[in-house]
Amino acid sequence: MAHLFNRNVVLGVCGGIAAYKAAFLVRELQARGADVRVIMTRGAEAFITPLTLQALSTHPVHRDLLDEEAERGMGHIELARWADLLLIAPATADCLARLAAGRADDLLTTVALATAAPVLVAPAMNQQMWADAATAANMATLEARGIHRVGPADGDQACGEVGTGRMSEPAAIAERAAGLFEHGALAGLRVVITAGPTREALDPVRYLSNHSSGKMGFALAAACADAGARTTLVSGPVTLETPPHVARTDVESAREMLEASLALLPACDIFIACAAVADYRPEHAADDKIKKSEERLSLTLVRNPDIVATVAAADPRPFTVGFAAETRDLLAYARGKLERKGLDLVVANDVSAEGIGFNSDDNAVTLLWAGGEAPLPRSGKGSLARLIVQHIAERYSASRAGL
Ligand code: PMT
C-alpha cells in the first residue's frame, strides 16, 4: 500500500450517488497516513450528511464560501494553502465543467483555483454524460492544465445503465493519490528521535541539566518528515515549535525519556538519540525546597539508564543511531560508543569548538559506522540534518540488504 504520511488532503465531495463512497474514501486516505479535511457542495449534502464526514475526518466539514465562521478560522485561502492535494471525488460533469471554465462561485471551485497543490479528480456520472463531447472537452482541458484523473470505471450504474462512468473504488483512488507524491528517502518508515536536555530534580524547584536547546534534534525531525518518514520527537524541555507533520511527546527526566521511547519502539524502524541525556541524577529528590542551612552540601548521584543502549539491545530492534558529544579524542571516543552501545551509526559531535554543538545554530559532525566514516563540514543545523538523514537512509537500506 502506498502511503500519504505527512500529507494534508482536501477532499471535495460533489452531488452524485457515488458521494456515499466518500466516507470509505476518507478512511482509505487516513489508512495511508493522510490528514483529511472535507469540502461538500450543496448537491453532495443530498447524498451524504456533513456529520458523517465530520465524524470520520475528525474535522468540521467546509461548505460555504462566505461562511463567517470559516473565514475567521480556515477560510478558502487557508484551506487552499493547507492542502498538499485537492482530491475531488466524486467529480460530477457539472464540477468538471465549472473547473474547466475557471469558475469560483462556491468553496470547492474557489479552493481549486487558489491552491498550488496538485488536483486529482475522480469523475462519476451517467455513461452517456461521460461520453458526451462537452464533458470530454472539459476533461481534456483540465488534463492539459495538469489536473490528474483517476477513473471512471466500467460497469453497472445506479441509473440502471451499463458503461463507463462509475467512480473508481475508494482504495484505487487513495492509491492513485499516494502515487502522485514523489517519495522521499525515508518514505513509509517510522522514526523516533530524542531531543533536547533532560532535567533531573534536586528538589521541587531545582534540577541538574545541560545546555542542549533541542535545535539539532528538531532539525532532524523536520528533515525526517520531509524525507517521508512518520516522525515522532521525544523531547526534553525546550522552547522550540514542533516542526510540521511531526508528532511530539514531552518529557522531563531521563527515566521519563526512556519510558516514552520504549513505548514507541513497537512502531519504530529508525531510532535517533540526539538528546543530551543526564548521565546521573540525584539519588533522592527532596520533597521540599532544600534550605541553605549547611556550609557544604553533598549530593549523591546515581547513574541514569542509557536510553540508546537499551533501544539498541531490544529484540526486535530498530536501526539505531546515537550521537557522541565529545570535547577531545572525538573519533576514538565516538567509535567506542558505536561499539559499546551496539549502534548502527554514530554522529560524532565536537562540542568544544566555538559556535557549534550545544545551543548554537551551526554544527559540524562526522558520521561513523562499522567500516566507514563521513565528515560533514560546518553548516546550519537544518542543512546538516538533511545530510545526516540522507546518510541514515543509505545505511538503513544497506543494513536491510545485509550489506
Ligand atoms: O540541542 P542542541 O542545542 O541543538 O545541541 C545538539 C547536541 C550537541 C545536544 C547534539 O548534537 C548531541 O551531540 N547530542 C548528544 C549529546 C550527548 O549527551 O552525547 P553523549 O556522548 O553524552 O551520549 C551518547 C549517546 O547516548 C547520545 O546519543 C545520547 O542521546 C545517548 N544517551 C546518553 C546517556 C543516556 N543516559 N542515555 C542516552 O541515550
Image (cartoon, rainbow, N blue to C red):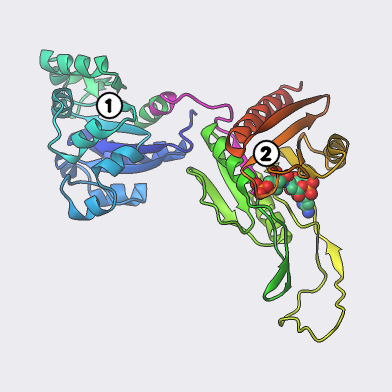
Three-letter code, disc 2: Asn
Q: Rate crowding at label 1 as few (under 14), some (14 to 19) or many (20 or more) other CA atoms within 10 Å.
A: many
Which element carries disc 2, helix, strand or loop? strand
Residue 29 sits above or below residue 146 on the image: below
- Is residue 199 visible in the rendered structure shown here? yes
Residue 248 sits above or below residue 371 on the image: below
Which element carries disc 1, helix, strand or loop? strand
- Decide if ligand 1 comes within 8 Å of the CB at mark 2: yes
Quadrant location of residue 323?
top right
The reply to whether the magenta stretch includes residue 190 is yes
In this rendering, the count of numbered labels is 2
Residue at 29% in and 33% down: 115
Residue at 59% in and 33% down: 383
Residue at 84% in and 84% down: 294
Q: Which residue lies under the disc numbered 2? A: 363
Q: Position of residue 166 (x, y in %)?
A: 24, 24
Three-letter code, disc 1: Val
- Is residue 267 visible in the rendered structure shown here? no
Q: Rate crowding at label 2 as few (under 14), some (14 to 19) or many (20 or more) other CA atoms within 10 Å.
A: many
Would residue 312 appear left or right of 242 to someone viewing this image? Answer: right
Quadrant location of residue 108?
top left
Residue found farthest to the bottom? 293
The segment highlighted magenta reads: 177-194
Would residue 312 appear left or right of 112 to someone viewing this image? Answer: right
Q: Which mark is residue 121?
A: 1
